[in-house]
Image (spheres, helix red, strand yellow):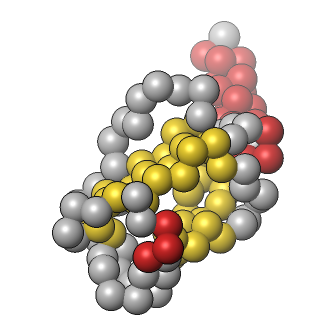
Amino acid sequence: MKKLILIFLLIGLTAAFALADQFFIENGTGSYSFIFVYVSDSRSDEWGTSLLGVNVLRPGQRMQVTTTIPVGNTTWNIMVVDEDNDTYTFWRRTVRSNEVVRVTLDDLD
């Protein structure tokens, strides 16, 4: 019985990884580091915690956003906060798998 449960658990984990999808967020500001990056399904009314944790995203760097929701099957709300506490917000953004969302000063709220 324990072996059967373990097999189902491994199949479930494998399926979860197979369903994972990703896109990228790139800091294209040229001079400001990002201190917070929030991404949520646009159907959600909460941002959750910053994907950066204690890290920063320096100009020119990019980060990977991995989700179990297929990227093209929903729209995304993305909010970035820079070192001056300026925000860059994208509401109901459609992205493709492996797309790079480049955040520039033109996107400043």
Which residue is more in the foreground, 18 or 99? Answer: 99
At x 59%, y 34%, the residue is 42
x, y (%) of residue 55? 28, 67
Q: Quadrant of the C terminus?
A: bottom left
Q: Is residue 86 above or below residue 89?
A: below
Can you tell which quarter of the image residue 32 is in? bottom left
Which residue is more in the foreground, 88 or 40? Answer: 88
Can you tell which quarter of the image residue 73 is in? top right
At x 75%, y 43%, the residue is 70
Q: Is residue 62 above or below residue 20?
A: below
x, y (%) of residue 41? 59, 36
Q: Quadrant of the N terminus?
A: top right
| 37 sits to left or right of 102 | left
At x 44%, y 76%, the residue is 105
Can residue 90 be seen at all in this image of the molecule?
yes
At x 28%, y 63%, the residue is 86
x, y (%) of residue 78? 51, 50
x, y (%) of residue 51? 39, 53
| 26 sits to left or right of 33 | right
Number of on-image labels:
0
Question: Which residue of the protein is positioned furthest toward the top in this rendering?
Answer: 1
Can residue 61 be seen at all in this image of the molecule?
no
Which residue is more in the foreground, 29 or 55? Answer: 29
| 41 sits to left or right of 53 | right
